[in-house]
Amino acid sequence: MNDRLTNPDRDRLDDAVRAMRDTPTPPTPPTEQTVRWLESIDDGRADRTFPFPFSRKTIMRIAPPLSAAAAIIVGVVVFAVMTASPRVAFADVVDKLREIQTASFVLIIDSTQGKTVLRSYVKQPNLMRQESSAMGQKIINVYDFDAGRMVTLLPDARMVNVVDMKNLTSEAPFNIIDEVGKISDEDAEFIGEETVDGLRLLRYDFVQGDFSGKLWVDPETSLLYRSVMTSVGPNGDESTIISEDFVWNPPLDSDLFDLTVPDGYRPILADDSPPQAADVAAVLRLYAYANDGVFPDDFNAFSLFNVVEVMNPPGMTPQERREFWIGFVEEVTGIQAPEPEVLRAEGQWLSGRISKAGILLGFAMESDYHWTGRGVTAGDADTIVCYWRSMNGDGYTVVRGDFSVETGVPKPEID
Amino acid sequence: MPDWNLIVAEHGTAVWRCVYRLLGDEHLARDCYQETFLAAMRARGGEPVKNWSAMLRAIATRKALDVLRARCRERQRSDPSTSPDWLASRNGHAPGAAAEAEQLRHAIRQALARISPRQAEAFAMRHFEEMNDGEIADRMNTSARNVQVLVHRAAAKLRDELPDWVHEDALPGVTP
């Protein structure tokens, strides 16, 4: 090597680099074969399947958390509209909103975990539907915030997930109209008129909770036209939420909000018990296992898609992925060398926990949630990795580096 | 749509060498090779690509290192292959120089899997792919200066991570 890596004495790294450069290599795969495969992918003809237990269906189970988070964001968006209306009389906006019985809009959530687009439908006073897709699979979430129930449908796989949210909704904006009375206009600044999509709109900049951003209101209707909201996490990672394509009071069929499980759908989860902090701890255990025993820099409802990436490394053969996943199952359940039936059952159980953890995190993010586990090593019982205000109003819930959970404790004093 | 026949024909060998060098396993390398071209197809987003060679080798390096890390984690759990004794038995009858080179490759792959992913990526592109700092910086969305820092730190870490036997003159099981 011309560029020696180190001291003039014998450097074995130098030797190793040379050995790598001189690696004897088998023949390159045939060009025609590679090109055929690429073209089939480009045409959508190739079926890129996922190995057990991260089948496409399993991946879809991770979507509800994001939707749960987005449901909260909807409340924030409406809050922001109300907050930032100095050029439109507040009473007018309130009155206008009270007239709104239905709405549809698009939410685009762009974070370090990727971009997600959710087509949302709202029907006052308590119903919401969100449609999204991931990995080519359509996902439908229907919420009844009064009943504390959420149904997730995977039409292609004909699978359904029903979640009891009753113990989570105390912090959720279950009725956006009711929230209007809490609004103040102290945090919004009128910027001026701007032309967007050929329309003259009123632009406001605002701060709302952890979010800052800008929004545009149609002066003709006193209703939101578009908003761009940014939240910066404790580690500096930005999440941007764009809401747009609003249609106010569209005719929406009641079937859109039907929470009845359709005939022929199989349940995704073995049980419909409410999400618990132990679910979050289980997912963290998986993440730490896949990340060489170190917790991630950040972890919240948006991170769940990233969990998929971490737990499903590319380039493995099916057999290697299977072995990789056996390690996960062994790590979390303590069952060594599980038989195939046990592995399948435990894999499904784990998938359920991932889904529930995400749902819980979606709500916890609105309940003084803090991630403090950056760089912490798994097994560290002395260090708190995350905490949030318990949703039953009984103190705080804390998860430690050894995956233990404490509830009803005072708020941790962590800088 | 780009001419994939031309692109694969022109750059396939370099991509293949890149992934096989890092993985040392033909089966894994084949997966990674395909994934590299697939990622390139999706990443370009319809935009013209100025430097296919750098782009493909950067993607290949990143993907191969991802696989290498995952594989090493799994092997640490269940396979004694990280032990020099295992290597000694495997290479016991190989000619000395070839066996030594194989041992060194195995050792540096293990070490690469243990250091920071960005450092490993920069080091591999610089020293195995022999890409220049500007090319690496473009692919890693950073500055050439930062690339130099990453490579320097990677080299220091790799020296620490290489097992003791690598630094010894008498390698286990190698015929002098």
Image (spheres, coloured by chain):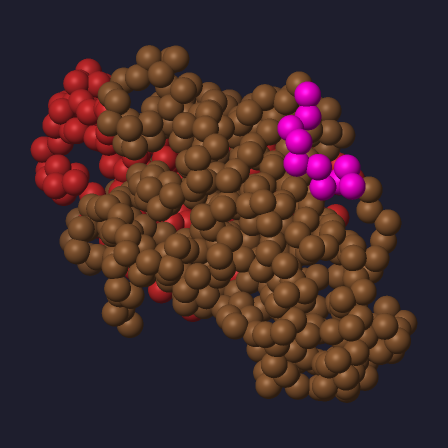
Tell me if A320 is positioned left or right of A42 in this view.
left
The image shows residue A288 at horizontal and vertical percentages of 31, 43
Main SS of residues in magenta = loop
The image shows residue A347 at horizontal and vertical percentages of 41, 25
Tell me if B93 is positioned left or right of A76 in this view.
left
Residue found 51% across the figure and 70% down from its top: A210
Q: Give the range drawn in magenta.
A: A254-263
State the residue in front, A75 or B63. Answer: A75
The image shows residue A205 at horizontal and vertical percentages of 66, 80
State the residue in front, A317 or A33. Answer: A317
Residue found 77% across the figure and 37% down from its top: A255
State the residue in front, A266 or B77. Answer: A266
The image shows residue B162 at horizontal and vertical percentages of 20, 43
The C terminus of chain A appears in which quarter of the rendering?
A: bottom left
Chain ID, brown in image: A
Chain ID, red in image: B
The image quadrant that residue B171 belongs to is top left
Tell me if A49 is positioned left or right of A4 in this view.
right
Q: Is residue A195 magenta?
A: no
Q: Is residue A260 magenta?
A: yes
